[in-house]
Every structure is written in structure tokens, then in C-alpha cells.
Image: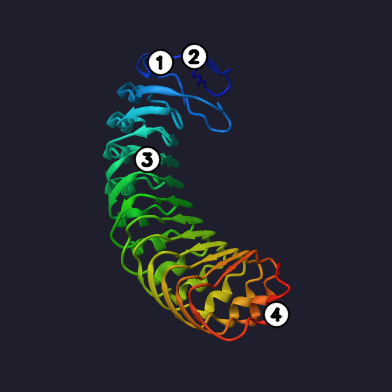
Amino acid sequence: MILLNCYKHGSHPTTVAPNGLVSSVTLLAGLSMYLVLGSGDDFITDTSMNGTLSSSLGNLSFLRFLDLSNLKDLKGSIPQELGRLSQLNYLFLDSNKLTGSIPISLMNLRKLKKIYLSDNQLTGRIPYPVFEFLTSLSEIGLSGNQLSGGIPFSIGKLVSLTKIDFHSNNLSGSIPISISRLNRLQYLDISENQITGSIPNTIGGLTKLVLLYFNQNRLTGGIPYSISQLVSLQFFQLSENKLTGRLPASISWFPSIERLIIENNRLTGNIPDTIGFLTNLTEIYFSNNEFTGKIPSSIGNLRNLLTLDLSRNYLSGPIPPQLAPLS
């Protein structure tokens, strides 16, 4: 049975077993502030629903929280009528089988704080106006779809964003330099797409970034020196691109870095001795590049290191004895 929790502040939840979304939401119009049929950790652990999203959802004018995630067999398109939910703060439609494009009407959800449409079968472009007007948005998840086209330049207007997850789509074009305006951003994952061009020098402005994943794209050029400004970074993946040039010695300015993965590129030159300053590192993947010179003995300082992969490069000289204590 699918449970529908609907209640106002100060009242007790009501449990409804709906025959379909159409009849249920019609009964609740003008009443509910929370509509939860999804199976998030705080609600139901295993749910399933057949059918499509009803346009009647747009009648729930006081709705603030809409969670229809992980219903497994929920199909069809996202109704344009959802754009009428002007009070909505949270929209979770992830982990279903939704198809079609992202409705441009979502631009009307001016109070939206979080939106997750991940792990569906959505196609088409990310609508430019959605980023033009949703200035209260703090998290956006569109990963695991079939979205195409570029990342809109207008994303730079969403200055409250702390999380962007666009990985595993068919996005193309370059990384918009406007993204550097998002100085609250902590999580940026655009991996597993078809992004081209270089990594913007302005990326260094994202000083609160904890996670940066650009892996499995078609990026070219070098790793910008400005990455040294990402002092909060813990997880860094640039693997499986076409990056060239040297690894900046300024990587030693990543005091919190734990995972440094840049394998399967065309990076050249020596591995900087300064890598030995990154004492929180647990994983180094530098394989399948064109690094030359000796293995830095300073790697022996990395007592937390669990994985070190320097294979398929042009390194020479003996293995430093300082690496022997590493377990």
C-alpha cells in the first residue's frame, strides 16, 4: 500500500491509500502542505506505483513539499501544471521512469530550495529560464538522465547553490565561466558527459568546494593554477579527459584533499615533490598519463595513503625507500 501523508502544521498526519494520483490530489486541493509518496529514508522503505503524474497536482496551491521519488514504475512526463505550485520549497521526483523534457513552467517556482529529477529518462535541454529565476535554489540534481545541450550560462545567477549534480547525461559545450560566481558551492559534479573546452581559470573562486568531479568528459588544455585556491577541496576527479601540461606544484595548497584522481589524460612533466604535503590523501590515481622523472620520495609522508597508482607513465629511477612504510 502507498501511504500519502498530508497535514498542516500543528495537526496529525492523515493516511490515505490512493487508487490513483488524480482522485487523491483533487480531494486534497487547497489543504495539504506536504505530499509524500516517495520512499526516502525518513518515510517508506519500499514502495511502487504504476501510472503517470496527474496535472491535478497543480491544484495543490499550498503545497510546500512534494516527494514522489523512487516509486519505480512512475512513468510519463512532468506536467506543466507543476509550475502553478508557487509555494513549493522542495520537489523530489528522482528515481522513477519519467520521460520527456523539463517543463519550462518550473521557472515559476520562485520559492524552490531543492529540486531532484535524477535517475529518470528525461531528454532535451536544461531550460534557460529555470536558472534565470530560481534564485532561492540551494540544491539541484539532474543526474542519470539523457539531457543534452549546454549548461546554461544563467546558472551563475543561482548564488544560493551549494550543490550541483549533473553527472551521467549527454551534456555538451563548455563549462560556463559564470559558475565561478557561486561562492557557496560545495558540491559540483558534471562528470560522465560530453563537456568540451578547458577548465576555466575562474574555477578558483569556488573556495568552499568540497567535491569537484569533471571526470569522463572531453576537456582539453591544462589544469589551471587557480585550483590552488580551492582550500576546502576533499574529492577531486579529472580522470578520462584529454588534459595536457604539467600538474601544478600548487596542489600542495589542498590541505584537506583525500582523493586525487587524474588518470587517463595526457599530463606531462614531473610529479611535484610538493605532493608530500597532502597528508590527508587516501587515494592517488595518476595512471595512463605521460609523467616523467622520478617518483617523489615525499610520497612517503602520506601515512593515510591506501591506493597509489602511477602505472603506465614514463617514470624512471628506483622506487624510493621512503615508500616502504606505506601499508
Q: Callout 1, which amino acid?
A: Ser
Question: Disc 1 and disc 4: Cα gap in Å?
Answer: 67 Å
Q: Which residue is mark 4?
A: 322
122 vs 5, nearest the viewer: 122
Residue 41's spot in the image, x, y percent? 57, 33
Q: Judge depth for marks 3 and 2 and give the one in front.
A: 2
Residues under numbered marks 2 and 1 in contact, where contact means CB atoms less than 8 Å apart:
yes
Residue depicted at 51% across the width and 73% down the height: 228
Q: Callout 3, which amino acid?
A: Arg
Q: Quadrant of residue 275?
A: bottom right
The local secondary structure at tag 4 comes to helix
Q: Which numbered disc, 1 or 4, marks the residue that appears first in the sequence? A: 1
Q: Which numbered disc, 2 or 4, marks the residue that appears first in the sequence? A: 2
The local secondary structure at tag 1 comes to helix
Residue 301's spot in the image, x, y percent? 69, 75
Q: Quadrant of residue 28?
A: top left
Question: Disc 3 and disc 2: Cα gap in Å?
Answer: 29 Å
Q: Which residue is mark 1?
A: 24
Look at the picture and state if 47 lies above or below 92.
above
Look at the picture and state if 34 lies above or below 19.
below
Q: Judge depth for marks 2 and 4 and give the one in front.
A: 4
Q: Is residue 137 in view? A: no
Q: Which residue is mark 3?
A: 110
